Image (cartoon, helix red, strand yellow):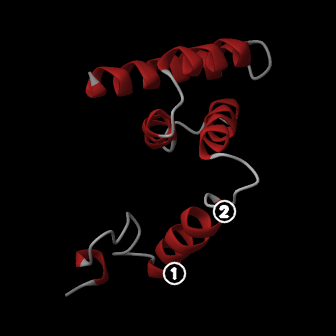
Amino acid sequence: MSHNDKPNAGPYADIAPALNDYTRQVLFGQVWERTELPKRDRSLVTVATLVALYRVNELPFHVKYALQNGVTKDELIEVITHLAFYAGWPCANTAIEVVRKVFAESA
């Protein structure tokens, strides 16, 4: 059995097992589980950061995760609208297209 065949192996298990383990154990296992900030708020911060930094590869996953963590579709759109004035119109425009696809998939 390869590392990637394990349940919940993660997206990097086949090529970068250490990165996969750090992602699962440290990022999502420790950082996201800290109680000082609710997951809902962590999701808002993460989505805002990804939009502002034009990180479109990671954005779909985190939009879905934000919805699971209680962020509403309207709140996600509002974050992107707000960021258009701080991160730039191209970042917001691209994020809207990503979010549109995620919303369509989840409908």
Q: Is residue 45 above or below residue 90?
A: below
Count residues near mark 2 (Cα–Cα under 10 Å), then give few for <14, some for 14-19, many for 20+. some
View extreme (front): residue: 35
- Image x and y of residue 38, in percent: 66, 46
Real-space CA distance between mark 1 and mark 2, rounded to the nearest whole angstrom: 17 Å
- Image x and y of residue 35, in percent: 70, 57
- Image x and y of residue 96, in percent: 51, 17
Q: SS of the residue at dot 2?
A: helix
View extreme (bottom): residue: 1
- Image x and y of residue 81, in percent: 65, 12
Q: SS of the residue at dot 1?
A: helix
Determine whether, in the image, residue 65 is placed left or right of residue 41.
left
Disc number placed over residue 3 in the picture, else none: none
Q: Where, quadrant-wise, is the N terminus in this rendering?
A: bottom left
Determine whether, in the image, residue 86 is placed left or right of residue 1.
right
Residue under label 1: 18
Mark 2 and mark 1 in contact (Cβ < 8 Å)? no
The quadrant holding residue 79 is top right
Nearer the N terminus, badge 1 or badge 2?
1
Q: Between residues 96 and 36, which one lies in front from this camera angle?
A: 36
Disc number placed over residue 31 in the picture, else none: 2
Determine whether, in the image, residue 49 is placed left or right of residue 58.
right
Q: Between residues 37 and 18, which one lies in front from this camera angle?
A: 37
Looking at numbered disc 1 in the image, what kind of residue is underneath it? Ala
Residue appearing at x 37%, y 28% in the figure: 102
Residue appearing at x 64%, y 34% in the figure: 44
Looking at numbered disc 2 in the image, what kind of residue is underneath it? Val
Residue appearing at x 42%, y 37% in the figure: 64
